[in-house]
Image (tube, rainbow, N blue to C red):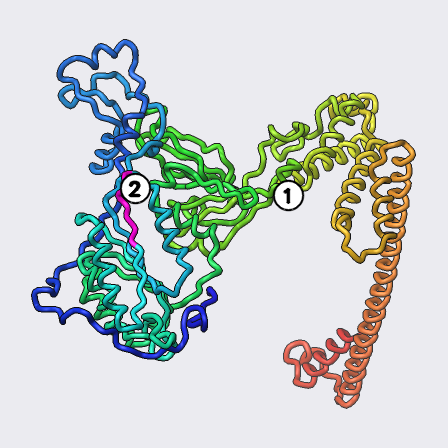
Amino acid sequence: MPCTKQTAKKSTGETANWISIPEPWEKARAADVLPVKPSIRIPPFRQPADKVAAKRTKILVPQEYRNTIRENGIHFQCVSCHWLLSQCQKVCKPYVGFTKDSAPILPTFLPVSGRFKLATCGHILSPSVLLIHFHLLLITSMFHVGIIYQSLADYFPHSSLDMLDVPFNLGMDEAATEYTRHAANLIEGLRQDYKYVLIVLTDHTDEDRRDLFVGANESGCIAAACIDNFLDNIFRPFKRFVSDSLMFIAVCGSIINQSESLNLLRDSLAKFQVSNALVTKSIVIHGFKFTSALEHVLKESMALGMHTGIMHFLLVAKYVWTHQDYQPWGQPLPMQCPQCGAVKKWKLVQHWDGSYSFECRYRHSHQMTVMVKNWMSMTTVQNALLVVPSANLGLRVAHLCDLSQGLPSRLRRVNPEAQLLRGVISLHFSEEPDLELLPALPIWAVWSWGETYLPEEIHTSAKAFQTALSQLKGFPWKSHKYGMHILLGLGLLIRDCWSVQELEEPEDGEQRTAPAYLYSSLLGVQKLEAVFVEVDVMSARLDQEPSSQTSVGEDKGGNEQVEESSKVVEESTPEGLNAEVGKWNEAAEKEEEKQGEEEKWKEEEKQQEEAKAEKRRLQDAAKEREAVEEERLGVQGKRKKCKIRSPSPVASASNPTKQDKLYSDEDSADLTVQ
């Protein structure tokens, strides 16, 4: 929220003595009262740019038909008219240009060279305008009116803009008479046919009553008058110009923050029939960024955006007007399909890899790929219309320090919440430099490299290997995008070095599982160490960059250590490389020892867990044996209590008694338990 202030003593408001301004003329008669009529709205400014653009459009007529188009009865339709007609009829047709009895005379469509744009030499509509500035005589700072006049003066080359400065000081009795005489002299020098009148009122207000200052009285004290009395005395001599005017009231915001003063102001403006009056609620409004204003300028004024971009030297920034149908991401689309001849009929199509293309609505098979990468596709966006701005501003921001080193800039997104607002969709992106403008990079250091191994020359030529390593080292690796290419290239080199080291010659009768050049490759442990040395050098440079900028109170010894370490890194002698390799070997040995200790600790922990599990298993088995033994002893005690008789064999076989059944069941149960 911008910082605001309602009053400021000694500058824009304070207390003042209330007076009533004496009127040197009689009260207005009924005939002097202006008749009530509706206010006239200022028509919008229209520039006949389409006609000028149509004249400058080049139409390519085949040589064999140039005499045919000059025959009688041939009608010509320009590209702009063809497009407007297709928009009204909602029918997409190829542009033929020349017709006879509503039938095309050319066998194919008519090629058009160029694109829709505004003319570089437009016509200026400069009606007569009068700028009147009413201000308190004690106010000396009037820069705001000067800015308005200087901004408009260049658009009125034929002296059709006049400015009238009207100071007032009505604190004394004779001041009103002098003001009326001075106003009459000013009006005599003006013409009578001004089409538009712009009025600016600059004054201070009383802090308590919200009255307007009128000037100093006989004693030198500042006096104030009621709003209706003040405006009636100020505007009465100019009532013919005040009617249907546009007014800016540059006074303290307290004039409309109180209901009484607001009602008086409303009644006075209605009395003089002011067409439009603007006044703010606050005195000081700041915190509004200039770049935000540029965004709204290009969004609201489509004519300005299609005519030119704006170069704002903030550091280095280019403001590009974008439109999803005419100029997506600041890249202009052709006005005509090069295959079927349809005019301005492109449809946005999003692909799976994050790229976009535009297909012709007349023939969907005709496609055109926009040669610009959408850097906002790095984030997940469900709706493509949130990525392609409808009619707004695109930003390409790059720091001067990055440009001087040839380094790409980082992606900047300003106010991502604004992308969800309808009509305020803006695309903020930074363009990475083209690969052609940067040092050479190995052709295989890209994500699209699909071969199993690197090219043969990397394995058979030591010079090719060293060249590729130097290219990866010298590339601008600080960028996130191109840094990934360097990591990919180094990873592929490390992969092939390990593959060659582990590759063995096949025995007699066996087929080779790898290309023949890998078995005689120069890559191996030594080349692998060279790759790791470059990785360490780049890591050391990254670690030293934050500490290179020392503060005022930093110790000198720290600077000497940084300089000494940087010298060691920059050295490329064999001794320096051997030292780096030795450091790497020591670090590798420490890492192996650490891993061995971790594995030993894990093995001991595993053995302890197994011992605990075995102990729990033995305890469970002992409990099961005790339960079985208790059950068996219980069955034997029950058998002793039973009285057993010896039945006859016949009875026992045919009709067993209850006791026999009991014995048989108990015996079988006993056997089962045993």
Expressed as whole percent of the image width and height from the top left, the position of residue 232 reads 22, 68
Considering only vertical position in the picture, is 489 above or below 387? Answer: above
Closer to the camera in the image, 118 or 205: 205
Q: Is residue 159 magenta?
A: yes
Q: Secondary structure at mark 2?
A: loop
Q: Residue at x 67, y 76 (%)?
A: 653
The C terminus: image quadrant? bottom right
Q: Is residue 658 magenta?
A: no
Closer to the camera in the image, 220 or 492: 220
Q: Which residues are magenta?
A: 158-164
Q: Quadrant of residue 362?
A: top left
Closer to the camera in the image, 34 or 27: 27
| Amino acid carrying mark 1 in the image | His
Q: Are marks 1 and 2 in contact (CB under 8 Å)?
A: no
Residue identifier under label 1? 480
| Amino acid carrying mark 2 in the image | Phe
Expressed as whole percent of the image width and height from the top left, the position of residue 610 reads 84, 63
Residue identifier under label 2? 156
Q: In the rendered image, is residue 187 in sight?
A: yes
Expressed as whole percent of the image width and height from the top left, the position of residue 660 reads 70, 82
Q: Quadrant of residue 6?
A: bottom left
Say which mark, if any, is on residue 652. none
Q: Nearer the viewer, mark 1 or mark 2?
A: 2
Q: Is residue 201 left or right of residue 632?
A: left
